[in-house]
Image: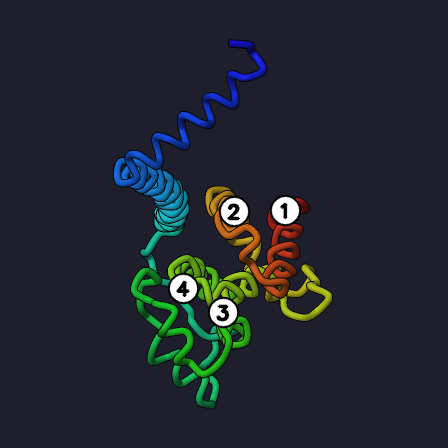
Amino acid sequence: MSLSLAPLMLVSRQAVSRTRHPLKYRVKRSLRSRERKLRLSLQSTRHLHTTMTTADQLSELLYASFPIEPLPRFFWLDDGEQPVGDIPEELLKRIAHRPWANVTMWDWTMTGAHASTARVYLDPNAFRYYLPSLLVGALREIGYLDWALECLLPAGRKRRTTGKWWTEFRSGFSEQQRAAICAYLKGVRSTRGDSIDPANQQLLDEAEVIWILSGR
């Protein structure tokens, strides 16, 4: 038999085999299809497990870096009395005098204001204490990622880092806590990737400039 006819004979034999044993051929094809699906499922599971583990590790890092005790000595801005209004009332009810690890994203949302707005009522040291509750909360409920990122940024569009409130807030972090925040930002970017919407991507970029690139 010439070499040129060999491929044709092979194809012919395969066609005959499929014709004579249709059930056997269908079973083999079904098994191959199930194997492909299983491989894809395992790959997807590994990716999901990696993402979940990373989020869990970030949470553990935050718990290890931000002590639960002591609670802040002052809660309201300028060591003052509680301001008048619904937001301060809800802050007192849901946040004040509680360990940060017991404060959930639900508690923050029930204050009736975005956390980056509610913080203007709080002493910088008090808000620094409660910040990790927002960071951990956003890992558990990614829909509130903007709450965490906004609270890592100075107020205002220009993101001025020279204001009195921000300076006191930023200067009170230990080196370990600053490193944890940097790891948090890098972790969010690596685990969420392209799933981060443009608005949060902008916030993440700005936070990285302040905490990772400039260290301000």
Q: Amino acid at mark 1?
A: Gly
Q: How many marks?
A: 4
Instruction: Please identify, in this view, whether the residue under mark 3 or under mark 1 is nearer the observer.
Output: 1
Q: Amino acid at mark 4?
A: Glu
Image coords of residue 78 (percent x, y): 52, 73
Asked if one can make out residue 132 in the rendered structure from this viewpoint, the answer is yes
Is label 1 in contact with label 2 (beta carbons under 8 Å)?
Answer: yes
Residue that label 2 marks? 178
Nearest to N terminus: mark 1 or mark 2: 2
Q: Amino acid at mark 2?
A: Arg
- As displayed, is residue 199 above or below residue 7? below
Decide which of 50, 158 is in the foreground and name it. 50
Decide which of 132, 59 is in the foreground and name it. 59
Q: Amino acid at mark 3?
A: Asp
Instruction: Please identify, in this view, whether the residue under mark 1 or under mark 4 is nearer the observer.
Output: 4
Image coords of residue 27 (percent x, y): 27, 39
Q: Residue at x 38, y 60 (%)?
A: 140
User: Alpha-carbon neighbours of circle 4 within 10 Å: few (<14), some, or many (≥20)?
Assistant: few
Nearest to N terminus: mark 3 or mark 1: 3
Query: How far apart, in angstroms, are the residues tagged by discs 1 and 4?
Result: 27 Å
Most extreme residue toward the right is: 158
Query: How far apart, in angstroms, are the residues tagged by discs 4 and 2?
Result: 23 Å
- As displayed, is residue 190 above or below residue 81? above
Give the numbered dot on residue 121: none
Residue that label 1 marks? 215
Nearest to N terminus: mark 3 or mark 2: 3
Judged from the image, the secondary structure of the residue bearing numbered disc 1 is loop
Residue that label 3 marks? 123
Residue that label 4 marks? 141
Query: How far apart, in angstroms, are the residues tagged by discs 3 and 4?
Result: 26 Å
Decide which of 81, 106 is in the foreground and name it. 106
